[in-house]
Image (spheres, rainbow, N blue to C red):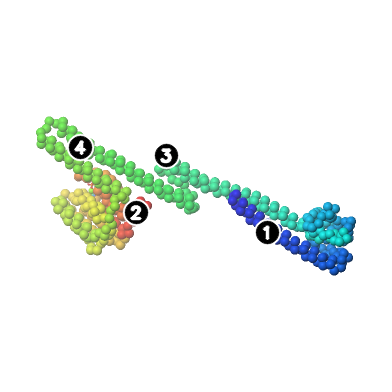
Amino acid sequence: MALFGSASAGAIGYIYYQTNVLLARQLEQTIEAETRGLAEQYNAGGISSLTKAVSNRSLTPGNSLYLVTDRDGRRITGNLTSISKDLWNSVGRVEFAYKRPSQRGVESRLALANIFRLPGGFRLIVGRDIEDRRIFERIVRSAFFIGLGFMALVGLGGGWLVSRGLLARIDAVTATSRTIMEGDLSERVPLNGSGDELDRLSRNLNAMLDRIEQLMAGMREVSDNIAHDLKTPLTRLRNRAEAALREKSNAKSYRDALEQTIQEADGLIKTFNALLSIARLEAGTTGNAMNEIDANALVQDFVELYEPTAEEKNITLTANVANGVHFKGDRQLVGQALANLIDNAIKYGATGKGGEIEVTATDTGKAVELTVADSGPGIPEQDRERVLKRFVRLEESRSRPGSGLGLSLVAAVARLYGGSVRVEDNEPGLRMVLSLPHKTTHNNEHRTR
Ligand SMILES: Nc1ncnc2c1ncn2[C@@H]1O[C@H](COP(=O)(O)OP(=O)(O)OP(=O)(O)O)[C@@H](O)[C@H]1O
Ligand SMILES: [Mg+2]
């Protein structure tokens, strides 16, 4: 407000000064012209000629003022009635107040005049009324103060309103961040929906908080999972070792116990590795390559790899791929996901008499879909979402080895490439579809940016 006030004061002051200079110059010129005219008269015809000219001019109404006096100060002619003795005695430029009749009686007005002494004691006074200038000055002064006062009022009021609104919103952000720091991650910065800078900032803060909350929840879930699901095998391992020690045994049974321990430890290591891979995929920190992958070759390779295992269980494993299906990704990761799906199909997708598994790769235009379909018991509707979570194993599969991380890894791979995993009914059996879009919003990117 101070800045704005001094700027407008400067502007008004400048305009006032310039107007004054102009008016003063005009005044000067008018008085000079009058004087010149009268001087000509005087030079031509002496004092009588001058008085005649002055009388004439005094008749025309206007702002010009004249007075001619004799040596004793008595008025000879002119429209000024009288002037003070002091004034009469001075010479040259004077500013003085004079009285003039008006509708409201006699009023005192301001005048500016030149006083000349003429030979013979005569005085000639030529001047102009400058009362208007005084009024103009007064108007400018009051405009200046009223204007400044009004501006101060509006400025202070407006500033108060704006800052109150803005500060209140910033306060809301501060309050929210304090609640969050105290541990409540679910708190969000309030939005007012205006879409202005502060609103956008708040929205971004909220999005960031969502992301952090999600990551925290993920981390909590992992640590909970580890606590629950790894404790059991570790306890089992420990108890077995203890039992082996307690029993009076021979070298062979010790050996058996040790072998079992190693087996159990291997299982644990495998589980840990799977957990680590999933965590790494979800954090998007693996610097995995994006290569052009031939889906045909990939499917053929894995079908060949699993054929012997399938044959053992009397399962026919077939690949069904059209040529020219390509997509971009990390071959190792996608291969691992496909292997997990085929492994599941062999493990759970066969009845005692055997079964059929078909592995397909298709290009839908938007995405490449790798499908593994079996003819086994399938997964009931209500469990289809759940099985993708870590350590989830359905009741009927508990008898078989596994840690429940296979499908979690498939889901993590899909998420990494912006794709999805679908758990569908194959009627009968299960059909798992891993869909990898061509235009990958590589999760690495939008996660770290
Ligand atoms: N083809 C399938 N048919 C029937 N049920 C299945 C099939 N694939 C998976 N499931 C069910 O989903 C559960 C989760 O599978 P997932 O691959 O994640 O774990 P897992 O196979 O038990 O262990 P892991 O793969 O880690 O060795 C399985 O335990 C099983 O109950
Ligand atoms: Mg599995």
Q: Is mark 3 within 8 Å of ligand 1?
A: no
Label 2 environment density (alpha carbons within 10 Å; few <14, some 14–19, many ≥20): few
- Residue 164 horizontal side relative to residue 186, left or right: right
Earlier-in-chain disc, 4 versus 3: 3
Q: Amino acid at mark 4?
A: Leu
Calculate the distance from the C-alpha at mark 4 to the C-alpha at mark 3: 41 Å
Q: Looking at the picture, how far across and down is residue 2, in whole percent?
A: 60, 49
Label 1 element class:
helix
Label 4 environment density (alpha carbons within 10 Å; few <14, some 14–19, many ≥20): many
Write the residue at 24% across / 54% down. Answer: 332
**Residue 380 appears in the figure:** no
- Residue 283 horizontal side relative to residue 46, left or right: left
Label 4 element class:
helix
Earlier-in-chain disc, 3 versus 1: 1
Label 3 environment density (alpha carbons within 10 Å; few <14, some 14–19, many ≥20): few
- Residue tagged by mark 4? 237
Find residue 445 and name its label: 2
Label 2 element class:
helix
Calculate the distance from the C-alpha at mark 1 to the C-alpha at mark 2: 65 Å
Q: Foreground: 225 or 137?
A: 137
- Residue tagged by mark 3? 182
Find residue 18 and name its label: 1
Q: Looking at the picture, how far across and down is residue 307, in whole percent?
A: 16, 54
Calculate the distance from the C-alpha at mark 1 to the C-alpha at mark 4: 101 Å
Looking at the image, is mark 1 or mark 2 nearer the viewer? 1
Q: Amino acid at mark 2?
A: Glu
Q: Amino acid at mark 1?
A: Gln
The quadrant where residue 73 appears: bottom right
Calculate the distance from the C-alpha at mark 3 to the C-alpha at mark 1: 65 Å
Label 3 element class:
loop
Earlier-in-chain disc, 1 versus 4: 1
